[in-house]
Image (spheres, coloured by chain):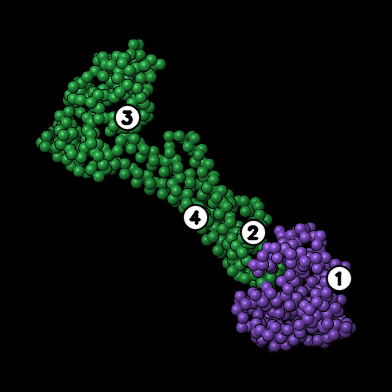
Amino acid sequence: MTPMSLLKYSLASLSGNRLRTGLSLVGVMIGVAAVLVLTALGEGARRYVTDQFSSLGTNLLVVLPGKTETSGLVGFGGIPNDLTLLDAQAVARGTRAAERVAPLSMGTEEIEYRARRRQVAIIGTTAEYQPARQLVVEKGEFLPAGDWTRGSPVVVLGQKAAAELFGAESPVGKVIRVGEWRIRVIGVLARQGVKMGLDFDDIAIIPVATGMQMFNRSSLFRILVQTYAHADLEEAKKTVRSILTERHEEEDITVITQDAVLATFSSILRVLTLALAAIAAVSLSVAGIGIMNVMLVSVSERTREIGLLKALGVARGQILAVFLAEAGLISTIGGLLGLSLGWALVQILLQVFPALPARSPTWAVVAAFVTSVAVGLVFGILPARRATKLDPIEALSRR
Amino acid sequence: MIRLDNIHRTFQVGTQEVRALVDVTEEIAAGEHVAIMGPSGSGKSTLLNLIGCLDKPTLGSYSLNGREIATLSESELTAIRRHEIGFVFQFFHLVPRLTAVGNIELPMVFAGIPRRERRQRASQALDAVGLSDRAEHRPDQLSGGERQRVALARSTVMNPTILLADEPTGNLDSKSGGVVLDLLGQMNAAGLTLIVVTHDPIVAQRADRVLLLQDGRIRKRVKSSAIAEILQFLADGGDT
């Protein structure tokens, strides 16, 4: 008997009972689609977080004032030294692995052009900030490179801030008021979106020295250090810490690698995806029990047929193959339908939540399909064996 | 050539032992036409199943065309059922979802005969039972007589040497039963060994000889022309 004629025979008997076959198909289909959709959600969440981090720039060290651990003696060493522009310059000079260093001060101010006012986040920084954070300038230019301590009265506006203030007017070259200061607009950023909770479209970027004067602060908010390569991060971290510890005569700063945070999030979310896949797999095994049930009914309904096959000289192995093929067909076709249903649902998900990059990982797609086929074969064994064990004489004596 | 030597067949039903065949010895030559008769429970069907290799004797020896059945493996028995033996049943046992041609092709499908040859042999077999115009009908679209003729075509399409029929007309009216018996007769005349289990003396009359069974034993072997003797045996419930 050729595999082709075996499949044809099994397919014919499946289509002989459409409702029953259809219902068990749906069981497998839902199981496979569930795996796809749930893993797509998990993977989407993971990629969303990962993208958020990497859109902030890669190979970054973030230096912040203060130690994150609780200090023992309150009042002594509890208040950290300021993180100054000179510290930033020392880091930039002393860290060989650093490709660039960008100091950062932050605050909020009202910006004003003619009658329009708007409260925005102000970032005081330097020219190095643009490549480190991968910002794209749409019109004009970014902050000029040069002496960090010289605060020139220039500003680069976020897309939305510029649009709100100027409408259709071209902002570049115009003078706006930032707080008490009169500052000339030299550039407008392209659309950046929200990154780590900060809306980069609704900001104003000014030179760091200007910022520190404006907010009347002696300490920087952060120092960003970007290394040449990922492998340099650890070394750079040590260098930065030792430079600043030496300058402050105590270790009162915290250095965070972005990758460490990212890796933690990523692995947490990967486990979440796996857990979701496992939950969905449970529904697949339920579908398998459905197939077994249907096949058991089919075997007892077709007792006479099985007896006949034996009388016709059909081997046990062939009878086993017939019933296994039927169970396998249900699960395979159900699996294929489930893949298309799952794919369609993920597409709908993408339409409804465009921000979430929901996509089932390849391993989940392959595993869902392979599992569904395996489920049919495994749960088909018991009914198929029952068929081969039927006594032909008894089977044939029935009406 | 069928050779049965001191065959016993015992079933265990609960705690009770049922002796379905007791010390049966018989020889049936190739091309013979034999009828087996006897009251219900006399062991007719058991004997037929045994000859058809669906069952094995508890004791005794059965040799078919010179091969001792007891020594054969499961797959060799399967091959014998496939190539040497054809079965016809009282309730036809056609597969309801398959057409007449599909049912006749069934044994060839599992024997791995190529599609083209299958089609050709199935339509020949269908032609032989006079149902060429019913090829694409499903069993529920056929009359009882037509169903049995399809079953007959199916049982002979693998060119067996022995045809075993268990009450082949038991479910048919006399007219369509007659057609089926004529066909069986033709096949026997063409060289097929034919063994028919029946209640009906008219069916038995067509055989060369009749085995009369009772309580698992062959009580009498009579010429089919000895109709009076057969009727007497049946009327006495076999007690002679």
Labels 4, 2: front one? 2
Q: Residues within 10 Å of mark 4 (few under 14, many from 20)?
A: some
Q: CA distance from mark 3 to mark 1?
A: 97 Å
Q: Quadrant of residue A386?
A: bottom right
Q: Nearer the viewer, residue B226 or A350?
A: A350
**Residue A135 tag number:** 3
Residue identified by numbered label 2: A8
Q: Position of residue A201 (x, y in %)?
A: 35, 25
Say which residue appears at 86% left-offset and 70% top-offset.
B178
C-beta proximity under 8 Å, tags 3 and 2? no
Q: What is the three-letter code of the residue carrying label 4?
A: Val
Quadrant in which the C terminus of chain A appears: bottom right
Residue B126 vertical placement versus B198 (above, below): above
C-beta proximity under 8 Å, tags 3 and 1? no
Q: Position of residue A293 (x, y in %)?
A: 58, 58
Name, please, the residue furthest toward the front: B116
Same chain under badges 4 and 2? The reply is yes
C-beta proximity under 8 Å, tags 4 and 2? no
Residue identified by numbered label 4: A370
Q: Quadrant of residue B12?
A: bottom right
> Of the residues under marks 4 and 2, which one precedes in the sequence?
2
In this image, B41 relative to A161: left or right?
right
Q: CA distance from mark 3 to mark 2?
A: 61 Å
Q: Position of residue B172 (x, y in %)?
A: 83, 67
C-beta proximity under 8 Å, tags 2 and 1? no
Chain B drawn colour: purple
